[in-house]
Image (cartoon, rainbow, N blue to C red):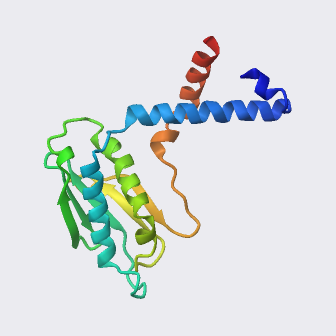
Amino acid sequence: MEGIFIFFSKKTRNRLRLQIIFYTFAAELRKTNTMKATEQALQQLERAIRKIAEKYPSTMDATQLTDIHIRVTQETGELMAFDDDDQEITRCVVEQWIDNKEDNFYEQITTTLRRAIEHQKKLVDEMSILKPYSFVLENDDKENEAELYVVDDNTVIIDTELMADLDKDLDEFFKKLLKN
């Protein structure tokens, strides 16, 4: 691998090494920290997102100011979507989530929900809601667990799971890599 880097300046070589380490580490982190969503679960989530988008069709003028609150009950696997006034928009049951007893349940489903929203990005971005608005994951006690997606022309959300303790994890990974 070192032979590839000899054509670059020292500064560029160091950047390339760090990027390789970062992407490798990020891939490993995603494997260990996320629940593997079944195809059925993804379809259920995407259908729920489409129902939310139908409530705010892109053909209408954006007149409402609201966020979309996605409330998930861990015991029942029920997902409900609400506006800021706590008016229910839609609901569904994600069978894979029923009776999930994991302590980090909400952390695990965050990535799955973000992926489902990303698959419906065009619909979500064109909803007739005044920008900026966001999709927020809440637990069944209405407590904010994660910001899933922000619709705004200038804002990007980076997965906080990926960024948590990144320095320590990268140092440990780099040490292991150098030992081999």
Q: Is residue 83 something that shows in the picture?
A: no
Picture quarter with the N terminus: top right
Q: Residue at x 72, y 34 (%)?
A: 16
Q: Check the image and name the residue furthest to the top.
A: 179
Left or right of 87 on screen, residue 17: right
**Which one is in front, 62 or 57?**
57
For residue 102, above or below residue 43: above
Q: Position of residue 57 (x, y in %)?
A: 36, 81
Q: Residue at x 67, y 32 (%)?
A: 18
For residue 164, above or below residue 134: above
Residue 24 lies in quadrant: top right
Residue 50 lies in quadrant: bottom left
For residue 82, above or below residue 115: below
Left or right of 11 on screen, residue 100: left
Q: Residue at x 33, y 55 (%)?
A: 137
Q: Position of residue 74 (x, y in %)?
A: 19, 46
Picture quarter with the C terminus: top right
Residue 156 lies in quadrant: bottom right
Q: Residue at x 40, y 64 (%)?
A: 120
Q: How many marks?
A: 0
Q: Position of residue 71 (x, y in %)?
A: 25, 57
**Which one is in front, 47 or 133?**
47
Q: Position of residue 144 (x, y in %)?
A: 33, 54
For residue 148, above or below residue 87: above
Q: Is residue 27 something that shows in the picture?
A: yes
